């Protein structure tokens, strides 16, 4: 029987949908993640909350409740050691203040793991302990973090804070996801939602937030990633719609080349790591807003991005560009784009690779660029 063009397209779409459904039906993610999630959660049951108020830096222009960090690639000038810092792209200065970032990454490890264990077991100890951390960070007067990022990615002698520092709160994306899936007390959930509402409003109105939204590379992506995730928690359908539109009209058209790559990331001194990072951030948006199968008329979209990057995740030796100047050997890990894309696009090979990769890296730089680690909260 001959099929016309429209019928062939419909048949292709139906086949793709069937493959996606079959992949989701046959993958027992809870069984795969059971031991890993519970091992982590049981360890975290003994961990007490540590927020931004537990440490500080004399170089911060903010107060004890303000998040502070310093630009990673900025170093003392050998010609003027006491003067403004100078940039060395891709080279992380180990002497910069990172304690607040470490505390936030710690939160992003603890709360999602506890939420995953709660989802698997329905044991209250996991949800209750996660609630302690959420209250400490977002509600309690003595320890909460202010819902703004005025002093992030500061540069000595140049800036007390910068818009690009908003990328530091990418680690709250999975925390927000976890909060919406825990069995929280009404007052706790309301308090957490209020914090994220206030912070998201700041991201949309302050000059730092606007500058970050308009960034042309992974920073612009991560703004949308965060706002999409936070608006899901707060129930803000207008912001979710805005993020969907921005993904389709700004991020993909302006960042993705015809072959699926991200030229802005390829131009960096760590092109492999940045390409993975941007792809994962886009994957989180696609997973949050159901955009995996959307594509532009020229074919650009998430499927094209995965087609480009998957071979280099499968066999890194085929990567055509120079190795990253730092942490090249540490990538890839269990990238969320693989599990999300494998299920949504009906690509079992993506899922197979995801299962082979390291789900729990310990290198600090890798953890900083790997914000989603509990797929049970997303699938």
Image: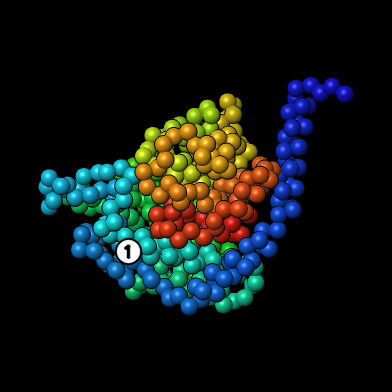
Question: Quick check: 9 left or right of 160?
Answer: right
Among all residues in the image, which is located at the extreme front?
A: 317
Nearest the eye: 203 or 295: 295
Q: Residue at x 61, y 48 (%)?
A: 353
- What's the coloring here? rainbow
Q: Residue at x 23, y 60 (%)?
A: 60
Q: Residue at x 12, y 45 (%)?
A: 79
Question: Quick check: 93 left or right of 130?
Answer: left
Q: On the image, numbered disc 1 is attached to which residue?
A: 99
Q: Residue at x 37, y 62 (%)?
A: 102
Q: Please say if 45 is above or below 19.
A: below
Where's residue 143, x and y in %? 35, 71
In the picture, which quadrant includes the N terminus?
top right
**Callout 1: 10 Å neighbours few (<14), some, many (20+)?**
some
Q: Please say if 95 is above or below 140.
A: above
Q: Which image quarter: residue 10?
A: top right
In the picture, which quadrant includes the C terminus?
bottom right
Where's residue 327, x and y in %? 40, 49
Where's residue 294, x and y in %? 61, 36
Q: Which image quarter: residue 217?
A: top left
Residue 252 at least partly seen: no
Residue 22 at least partly seen: yes
Where disc 1 sits, the SS reads helix
Question: Quick check: 104 left or right of 87?
Answer: right
Question: Quick check: 298 left or right of 57?
Answer: right
């Amino acid at each position: 029987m001959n099929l016309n063009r429209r019928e062939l397209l419909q048949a292709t779409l139906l086949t793709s949908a069937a493959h996606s459904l079959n992949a989701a039906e046959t993958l027992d993610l809870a069984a795969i993640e059971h031991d890993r999630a519970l091992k982590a959660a049981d360890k975290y049951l003994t961990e007490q909350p540590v927020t931004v108020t537990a440490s500080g830096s004399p170089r911060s222009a903010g107060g004890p409740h303000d998040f502070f960090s310093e630009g990673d690639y900025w170093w003392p000038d050998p010609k003027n050691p006491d003067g403004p810092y100078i940039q060395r792209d891709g080279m992380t200065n180990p002497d910069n203040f990172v304690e607040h970032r470490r505390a936030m990454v710690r939160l992003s490890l603890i709360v999602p793991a506890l939420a995953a264990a709660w989802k698997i077991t329905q044991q209250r100890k996991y949800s209750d302990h996660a609630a302690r951390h959420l209250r400490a960070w977002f509600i309690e007067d003595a320890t909460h973090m202010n819902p703004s990022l005025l002093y992030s990615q500061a540069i000595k002698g140049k800036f007390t804070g910068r818009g690009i520092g908003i990328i530091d709160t990418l680690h709250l994306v999975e925390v927000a996801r976890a909060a919406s899936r825990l069995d929280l007390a009404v007052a706790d959930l309301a308090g957490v939602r209020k914090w994220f509402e206030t912070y998201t409003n700041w991201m949309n109105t302050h000059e730092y937030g606007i500058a970050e939204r308009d960034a042309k590379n992974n920073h612009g992506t991560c703004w949308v990633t965060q706002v999409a995730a936070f608006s899901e928690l707060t129930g803000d359908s207008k912001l979710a719609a805005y993020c969907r539109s921005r993904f389709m009209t700004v991020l993909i058209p302006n960042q993705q080349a015809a072959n699926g790559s991200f030229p802005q990331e390829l131009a960096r001194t760590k092109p492999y790591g940045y390409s993975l990072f941007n792809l994962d951030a886009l994957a989180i948006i696609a997973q949050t807003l159901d955009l995996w199968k959307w594509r532009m008329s020229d074919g650009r979209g998430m499927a094209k991005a995965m087609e480009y990057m998957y071979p280099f995740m499968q066999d890194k030796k085929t990567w055509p560009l120079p190795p990253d100047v730092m942490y090249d050997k540490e990538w890839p890990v269990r990238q969320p784009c693989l599990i999300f894309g494998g299920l949504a696009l009906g690509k079992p090979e993506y899922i197979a690779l995801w299962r082979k990769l390291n789900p729990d890296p310990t290198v600090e730089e890798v953890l900083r660029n790997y914000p989603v680690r509990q797929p049970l909260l997303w699938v």
